[in-house]
Image: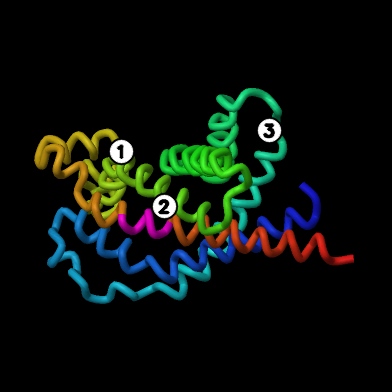
Amino acid sequence: MDGTGFTASLVAGGVAGASVDLILFPLDTIKTRLQSPQGFNKAGGFRGIYAGVPSTAVGSFPNAAMFFLTYEYVKCLLHTDSASHFRPVKHMLAASAGEVIPFSLVQFPLWESLKALWSWQRGHVVDSWQSAVCGAFAGGFAAAVTTPLDVAKTRIMLAKAGSSTAVGNVLSAMHAVWRTQGLAGLFAGVVPRMAAISMGGFIFLGAYDQTRSLLLEVGRKSP
């Protein structure tokens, strides 16, 4: 990765991270309250859903910048001309290097695969808005299949100190939800989670692609 690519990935990642948090933070707050064992209304309902948005956006800039810088750098290191079936593995490794969570391991290989398929059908690389659409589909799918993990994480975060759930065992937390609420409990908040992350994928990955493309174009035109 040359200097222009380094700067483009760093800045584009930061812009994407800040943009998505500014727009979608309230939906994430609603999703968390829906998953609360207290119930939506007792957890706060619709009150104060914009509280903390500016500080979250400021914090997201460096985190997203470093994630995408790592992601692009690892992709460059793993660059290969081998068969296309290896590409999802490369993207999984790149995503896990940037952020080791199951969500990224699902979202990013799917995003890259959808872009590659669309590019192949059109005969040229997809535009930024098309990349954003791919990001929305990838984000929505990843959100759906990882909802039980998200529910467990939320229960652990909201558990009373000293309780068995507060210990932080994700599998135990998921089992407890299954035992008391069944499948519906494990997928509590799945609709707003999918809506938020689909919109987030559209904004996050679309903004990243658009900003990075613009910066690379400026870099190529600079003497």
- Which disc is residue 90 wearing? none
Residue 103 placement (x, y as % from top left): 42, 43
Image quarter hosting the C terminus: bottom right
Q: Is residue 217 found left or right of 105 in the rendered image?
A: right
User: Can residue 215 be found in the magenta stretch?
Assistant: no
Indicate the secondary structure of the residue bearing disc 1: helix
Task: Give the Cα distance between marks 3 and 2.
Answer: 26 Å
Foreground pick, 206 / 4 = 206
Q: Residue drawn at (13%, 59%), measured in percent from left and top?
A: 39
Can residue 96 be seen?
no
Give the residue at mark 1: 170
Q: Residue drawn at (46%, 64%), measured in percent from left and top?
A: 20
Task: Give the Cα distance between marks 1 and 2.
Answer: 27 Å
Foreground pick, 137 / 103 = 137
Residue 136 placement (x, y as % from top left): 41, 52
Is residue 83 shown above or below 158? above
- For badge 3, the amino acid type reads Leu
Give the residue at mark 2: 136
Foreground pick, 189 / 110 = 110
Q: Residues within 10 Å of mark 2 (few under 14, many from 20)?
A: many
Which mark lies nearer to you, 3 or 2?
Answer: 2
Task: Give the Cα distance between marks 3 and 1.
Answer: 32 Å
Give the residue at mark 3: 78
Q: Residue drawn at (15%, 36%), measured in percent from left and top?
A: 178
Is residue 204 shown above or below 92? below
Which mark lies nearer to you, 1 or 2?
Answer: 2
Foreground pick, 147 / 171 = 147
Indicate the secondary structure of the residue bearing disc 2: helix
Looking at the rendering, the stretch of residues picked out in magenta corresponds to 195-200
